[in-house]
Amino acid sequence: MTNERILVMLREICMQFPEACETVKWGNPTFEAGKKMFAVLDHYDGSVCVAFRSLVDDTNELTKDPTIFPAPYGAKHGWWCIRADKTIPRSKLASLIETSYRSVAIKRMLTALDNQ
């Protein structure tokens, strides 16, 4: 998948969440809920990936997926990456990103999301 195609899909998914905004951090498109990041289009080892937050309970499941790996420099804070150099099923990415958003969003944002 090209950087542009994955960024378009990532924007479509992320910007549907209440109070989400796109910024640039470390030169990468970054999506935030309020002041907290929940998704980043990034590159590691020459590959495009999407970084996201996970819940501690999801760790075992994430390690079983060969396209997902702990985010360098962020794994200790619950960040993971999914390789995006090949096609990612939209539903899979959307599910990971929603979990990430929910992990950082404040109560009013979650209420708005649940009432959509």
Image (cartoon, rainbow, N blue to C red):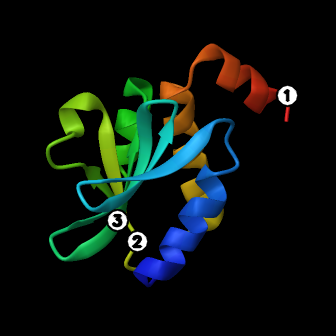
Among the two numbered marks 2 and 3 on one chain, the one whose residue lies closer to the N terminus: 3
Q: Residues within 10 Å of mark 1 (few under 14, many from 20)?
A: few
Asked whether the beta carbons under mark 2 and mark 3 sit within 8 Å of each other, the answer is yes
Q: Residue at x 34, y 65 (%)?
A: 49
Among the two numbered marks 1 and 3 on one chain, the one whose residue lies closer to the N terminus: 3
Q: Which residue lies furthest to the top in this view?
A: 107
Badge 1 amino acid? Asn
Q: Name the residue under label 2.
A: 84
Badge 3 amino acid? Cys
Which quadrant: the N terminus?
A: bottom left
Q: Name the residue under label 1.
A: 115
Residue 8 in the image: x percent, y percent? 57, 72
> Is residue 78 rendered to the left or right of residue 2?
left
Secondary element at image label 2: loop
Asked whether the beta carbons under mark 1 and mark 2 sit within 8 Å of each other, the answer is no
Secondary element at image label 1: loop
> Is residue 60 rendered to the left or right of residue 5?
left
